[in-house]
Image (cartoon, rainbow, N blue to C red):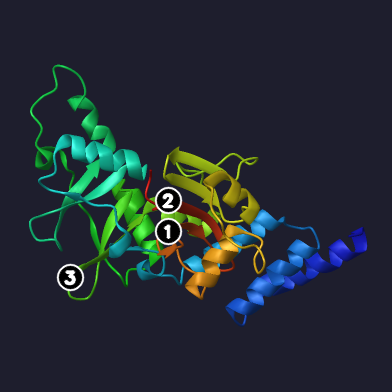
Amino acid sequence: MNKKEAISWLKRLKKFLQGEPKNKEELIKFLRDAQIRALINAETLAMIEGVILFSQMKVRDIMLPKQQMTCIEHDAHLLEIINIITQSGHSRFPVMGENKNEVVGILHAKDLLCFHGDDNPPFDLLDIVRQAVFVPESKRLDILLADFRRNRNHMAIVVDEYGAVSGFVTLEDIIEQIIGDIEDEFDIDEETYIKAHKDTHYIIKAHTPIEEFNEQLQANFSNESYDTIGGIVMNNFGYLPKRGEVITIDQFEFKIINADARRIKLLECFDLRPKN
């Protein structure tokens, strides 16, 4: 863009900002025009659009549903809890009470460190769980983010209009709505398609070629209709699934770890085939 075009665009920007945008669509169109003219980069545009949409979103739009929560029972033994933590790779877990619909607190994995070693104290899960924060499905995300920052919380249990647990939401989930994906325990090196956690547990990029998936996991998926494993998963769902949704295809269980409004990005895969 030459100097004359830049001046012209800046005059339009000044005029635009002095007035009021007629609607959200007009504002976004104007910002996209700025990106096309290289006045802002694609990452900045994506973040601004995220902020605009963020103010209208509610907890129910991003929460992980209860069916996909990795929970710990209040009377679980230490070794059982360690096994759950190891397999899931998460750091915080809702702890369920005698009533299966009751969350009695949140377990932080790091709070188990004091029970490692020969001189570990007697273990009682309810002694170390932290107080759970409960929020309604209808709570606005911007308000919840302010609450998280003020109280230094990282997770909230979501309840429906009747007070029943319907899922949970994390600080990371909220921030990703604005700035995009955050690296976490599921990230894979750029050069790698598949990361093996155990013999039957894998983290897989959705754009993994089917031939690569078949070779590494000794599977037999057809590549006649789709080129990637993400394409096969989405075809079997019949729609674009959201984070946390699970489907089983030919004795492989796939869980959506990351997806946006256009495509699946990251999958968790469990090989359910019987071992010899």
Q: Position of residue 86 (x, y in %)?
A: 32, 38
**Residue assigned mark 1:** 251
Asked whether the residues under the numbered discs 3 and 2 touch, taking CB atoms below 8 Å apart as contact, a structural biologist would say no
Comes first in the chain, label 3 or label 2: 3
- Name, please, the residue furthest toward the bottom: 22
Asked whether the residues under the numbered discs 2 and 1 touch, taking CB atoms below 8 Å apart as contact, a structural biologist would say yes
**Residue assigned mark 3:** 163
Regarding mark 1 in the picture, which secondary structure is present there? loop
Regarding mark 2 in the picture, which secondary structure is present there? strand
- Dividing the picture into quadrants, the one containing residue 235 is bottom right
Regarding mark 3 in the picture, which secondary structure is present there? loop
Most foreground residue, 4 or 276 = 276
Give residue 271's mark.
2
Q: Residue at x 60, y 61 (%)?
A: 48
Q: Position of residue 74 (x, y in %)?
A: 12, 48
Amino acid type of the residue that numbered disc 2 sits on in the rendered structure: Asp
Any part of residue 78 in sight: yes
Give the total number of marks visible in the rendering.
3
